[in-house]
Amino acid sequence: MRLISSIEAVRRETLLMALEHKQVGFVPTMGSLHDGHGSLIERAVKDNHFVIASIFVNPLQFGDGEDLDSYPRSIEKDKQIAEKAGVDVLFVPEVEAMYPSEIATKVVVSKLSQLWEGASREGHFDGVATVVTKLFAIVGPCTAYFGEKDFQQLQIIRQMVVDLNLPVEVVGAPTVREADGLAMSSRNVYLSPEERLAAPILRVALDEGLNLVRRGERDALVVMALMKKIVESEPLAVLDYVAAVNAKSLEIPEILHAEIRLLAAAYIGKTRLLDNDGLTLTE
Ligand code: PAF
């Protein structure tokens, strides 16, 4: 595995791959890699001739008062994980290389970006869409892998790729979980031992919500009320939102049908955790 920090050097690599008709897999990350990232990389290695992973903690997607400065960074461990998983090039640009001057152009995926996470974290998805567009412009034609753990982000990126005709195929991969159901996330390291025990409450709320739907409930508000009650039953959890939505529009439908997704976000102590799960209704 080669570590590359220069944009031009990555372009040279992918140009060479294109000339050799080799498929490129791309896994964008903010580092602090865990098994969730590992599974994305392994999938990319399986599907492609050549795999690039990037590590870039993108300042543009953090709001004032958010955890940009304290965001977990573990580059030495990340290098080992990436190499072991089969990455060919680890792209780790400096902030100055990605944003040499104040950025005047932003990518805004309207509607989808305003809901849920977007409502709680103003401007967050504009920052994500902008940096992912820049990364796609650097890497070029590729298949890019994102975790379903950030389901709204995944849907926004899918929409953006269609809207802007980006030469990228987007693949979403299932959330990887700890043994007790907690979705793997770089931010889980912030949790104290007591908070860590409380954190799977989001998974419990999603499971119970899905069970209610499986038993025949089709009123999204009833499902959401149950999920809310479950999250609020955990004394260490402060609920941000729960939602039962259409998986494409991310809006709450009058009657749950077709592909649905349950979303949940809560603070456990100071740590903001997200989770989601879904199913497809056929009747
Ligand atoms: O999901 C992430 O790690 C980030 O939002 C991404 C997609 C790498 C953009 O910075």
Image: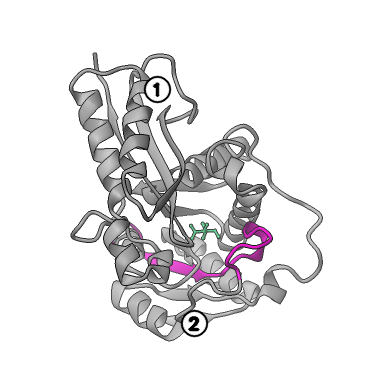
Task: Tell me the colour scheme of the image.
Answer: one colour
Q: Which residue is mark 1?
A: 221
How many numbered tags mark residues here?
A: 2
**Which stretch is magenta?**
46-68
Q: Which residue is mark 2?
A: 3
Q: Residue at x 73, y 50 (%)?
A: 106
**Residue 174 appears in the figure:** no
Using residue 89 as the reference point, say whether residue 43 is left or right of it. Answer: left
> Seen from this angle, which residue lies furthest front?
235
Q: Is residue 157 above or below residue 85?
A: above
Q: Is residue 49 magenta?
A: yes
Q: Nearer the viewer, residue 198 or 282?
A: 198
Q: Residue at x 36, y 28 (%)?
A: 225
Q: Residue at x 31, y 52 (%)?
A: 175
Quarter of the rendering occupied by the C terminus: top left
Whole-percent x, y for residue 72 in the image: 48, 74
Q: Is residue 131 above or below residue 213?
A: below
**Residue 79 appears in the figure:** yes
Mark 1 / mark 2, whichever is N-terminal: 2
Residue at mark 1: C-beta within 8 A of ligand 1: no
Name the secondary structure under disc 2: strand
Q: Is residue 53 magenta?
A: yes
Give the Cα distance between marks 1 and 2.
Answer: 49 Å
Whole-percent x, y for residue 167 in the image: 55, 47
Amino acid type at mark 1: Leu
Name the secondary structure under disc 1: helix
Q: Residue at x 40, y 74 (%)?
A: 88
| Quarter occupied by residue 279 | top left
Amino acid type at mark 2: Leu
Using residue 201 as the reference point, say whether residue 265 is left or right of it. Answer: right
Q: Nearer the viewer, residue 45 or 75?
A: 75
Q: Nearer the viewer, residue 89 or 150?
A: 150
